[in-house]
Image (spheres, rainbow, N blue to C red):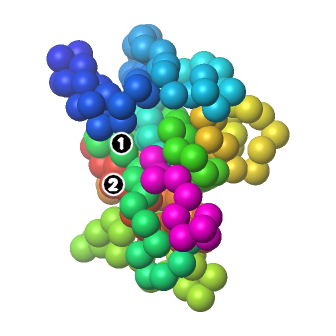
């Protein structure tokens, strides 16, 4: 397990440049701090931690596009990258590390039989329906923000049963631009 987590972390480091990701496993696991590009944005957030199994998602975006406004059906590349994609059922703390240049949020919704992440209909407000929402990450560093700011972190602790879940950012245009991932709970 440690080798698999290390391999995932190495791949993410290669994909993200100077930003390293913290992975915390349930039952007394350890975390590794992230570093690099965050200091330039003035953030000094500790690694997310919480009860149960920890699952970290990293938000990335390509900065300003279209003069700072997102337009069109595919406004630009954004990613929500999971550090791990499967966890055991029970108490799960789902964390967001914002390694992007824009604010992001993290919502957890169940995926029904045959549903695929990234396929929810996008409404006129450029967001997806939040019907069935299980939880939304609250900003933990810095605190007090509605969304997780660049360089910040957020998390939510949920009791998850076996199944598949979609983790997404539902700020206008972000889901359409690729900010979704699947989490499998066994």
Q: Quadrant of the N terminus?
A: top left
Residue under the image location 46 percent in, 72 percent down: 75
For label 1, the SS is: strand
Q: Position of residue 49 (x, y in %)?
A: 55, 23
| Position above or below: 36 against 71 | above
Task: Return the residue nearer the eye: 158 or 172.
Answer: 172
- Is residue 68 found inside the magenta-colored segment of the image? yes
| Position above or below: 46 against 130 | above
Q: Quadrant of residue 20?
A: top left
**Residue that label 2 marks:** 182
Say few, some or many: other residues with alpha carbon within 10 Å of mark 1 (under 14 / 14 to 19 / 20 or more): many
Q: Is residue 83 left or right of residue 154?
A: left
Q: Nearer the viewer, mark 1 or mark 2?
A: 1
For label 2, the SS is: strand
Q: Is residue 118 left or right of residue 176?
A: left
Instruction: Specify whether residue 42 is in view.
Output: yes
Instruction: Specify whether residue 185 is in view.
Output: no
Residue under the image location 48 percent in, 82 percent down: 72
**Residue that label 1 marks:** 82
Cβ–Cβ below 8 Å for labels 1 and 2? yes
Please give the range of residues in magenta.
60-69
């Amino acid at each position: 397990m440690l080798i698999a987590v290390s391999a995932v972390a190495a791949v993410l480091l290669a994909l993200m440049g100077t930003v390293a990701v913290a992975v915390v496993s349930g039952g007394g696991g350890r975390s590794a701090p992230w570093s690099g590009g965050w200091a330039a944005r003035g953030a000094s957030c500790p690694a997310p931690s919480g009860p149960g199994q920890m699952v970290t998602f990293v938000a990335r975006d390509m900065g300003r596009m279209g003069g700072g406004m997102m337009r069109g059906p595919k406004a630009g590349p954004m990613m929500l990258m999971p550090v791990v994609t499967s966890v055991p059922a029970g108490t799960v703390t789902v964390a967001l590390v914002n390694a992007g240049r824009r604010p992001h949020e993290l919502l957890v919704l169940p995926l029904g039989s045959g549903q695929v992440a990234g396929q929810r209909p996008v409404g006129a407000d450029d967001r997806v329906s939040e019907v069935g929402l299980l939880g939304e990450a609250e900003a933990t560093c810095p605190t007090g923000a509605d969304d997780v700011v660049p360089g910040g972190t957020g998390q939510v602790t949920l009791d998850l049963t076996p199944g598949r879940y979609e983790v997404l950012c539902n700020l206008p245009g972000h889901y359409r631009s690729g900010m979704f991932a699947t989490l499998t709970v066994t």
